[in-house]
Image (cartoon, coloured by chain):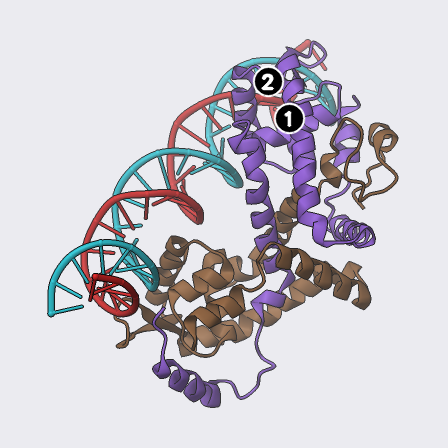
Chain colours: A brown, B purple, C cyan, D red
Amino acid sequence: MARTSSDIALKTRQADEASPRPKSRLDLFKFVPFRLNRLAAEVSSALAVEYQERHGLDIPAWRVIATLGFRNDACSAQYIAQCTRTHKSTISRAVTTLLHDELIERVENEADRREFRLQLTKKGRTLYEELFPQLLRREDEILACLSAQERKQLSALLGKIEQSLDLIQTSEEADAKQAY
Amino acid sequence: MARTSSDIALKTRQADEASPRPKSRLDLFKFVPFRLNRLAAEVSSALAVEYQERHGLDIPAWRVIATLGFRNDACSAQYIAQCTRTHKSTISRAVTTLLHDELIERVENEADRREFRLQLTKKGRTLYEELFPQLLRREDEILACLSAQERKQLSALLGKIEQSLDLIQTSEEADAKQAY
DNA sequence: GCTAGATAGTCTCACGTGCAACTATTTTGG
DNA sequence: CCAAAATAGTTGCACGTGAGACTATCTAGC
């Protein structure tokens, strides 16, 4: 809980954690947006060890790899950008690096010569197969403080928020748009 | 989006050959670290409207204001950095701006002339009093998809993860160190 | 079938931020 | 009491990234 034991905090905290408005102050530690930010940053840096130090990838590159690894068919940079909600220029740069490192390859799409179909190379897939279990293990460690049921709860809650923020349909939407 | 028959061929061909075992993949959309990142980014940008457009603050500045607004006593930049888990140089720059805008003021600490005690000015407190209800309202909108109980659940789950990541004790630790 | 608008991807620019060096001060330990 | 380590805060530097311009291509409408 975002419950600290400093007296000031305790005195002014509302009993109900979900209470929409404390009296005349805002406890940053109970403020969900702040907590999400901090948590995401922390979790990210905990994972960074895996893909950064061990494999030389940064987050955008990992997102490209992960997207291509999950969908075994080739897809466009645009698609990856939409799915991962990452700016297209960021994806573009990651793609350039990954191409150079021969972790992915791209094929011209004769049907639409503006775009390129991206897919993992053998080397890239090997890396993916090696990397993602490590990342899942990390995730597991991070969520080890939760019971199986709590994890489900968490997943469901995140899902609801994502949905209400329109973060969810990206996959289907992108697919729909893409009509692959 | 010009996506047509060639893609279908592509997909099925690859599906046969490249995914003999569907088990060996990672669904980014079910990967909690990724989801947290995306969610935090989205929520942040939803809130940015409030403190950025309406009050000209960026996130670090808002964190300083929020910390000082919550604790009505003066505290050091270091303390804010620890509480908010923000780099001290980032806080330093935010403090410089806020001082210039006369939203906060700082007093030399005679007991330790390395540090300064920071506190909101009248102007700063006015802004705080105006801003934080707006932010709470936003938070409320974002969490409107959850019932009261679900919010409690969420809060509790986040709390557990925070705790296991040692994100929690910052406040007490900082207080202890600071002995304000 | 041509023009206007959309779309994929790249590139330049500006900016925020982490890192690390630096100054000034305090604390520690010999 | 002095030297060395620690700490608060600032600043220069490098880098990653979002915004947006730009090129090339495709689509739609007339």
User: Hey, which quadrant is residue D29 in on the image?
Assistant: bottom left
Judging depth in this view, the residue of D9 and A31 nearest the camera is A31
Q: Is residue A172 above or below residue B147?
A: below
Mark 1–mark 2 CB contact (< 8 Å): yes
Q: Which mark is residue B163?
A: none
Residue A171 percent location from the top left of the image: 52, 67
Q: Image check: B175 left or right of B39?
A: right
- Marks 1/2: CA distance? 8 Å
Residue A1 percent location from the top left of the image: 81, 46
Residue at horizontal 59 percent and vertical 53 percent from the top? B37
Q: Are marks 1 and 2 on the same chain?
A: yes
Secondary structure category for the residue under label 2:
loop
The amino acid type of the residue labelled 1 equals Ile
Residue A124 percent location from the top left of the image: 44, 73
Query: Which chain is indicated by disc 1?
Result: B
Residue at horizontal 84 percent and vertical 34 percent from the top? A13
Q: Residues within 10 Å of mark 2 (few under 14, many from 20)?
A: many
Say which residue label 2 marks. B103
Say which residue label 1 marks. B65
Q: Is residue B123 above or below residue A168?
A: above
Residue B175 percent location from the top left of the image: 78, 29
Judging depth in this view, the residue of A173 and A56 nearest the camera is A173
Q: Image check: D13 left or right of B175?
A: left
Residue at horizontal 36 percent and vertical 60 percent from the top? A97
Secondary structure category for the residue under label 1:
helix
Q: Earlier in the sequence, mark 1 or mark 2?
A: 1
Look at the image and tell me whether residue B66 can be seen. Answer: yes
Residue at horizontal 77 percent and vertical 62 percent from the top? A153
Screen quadrant of the N terminus of chain B: bottom left
Query: Which chain is indicated by disc 2?
Result: B
The amino acid type of the residue labelled 2 equals Leu
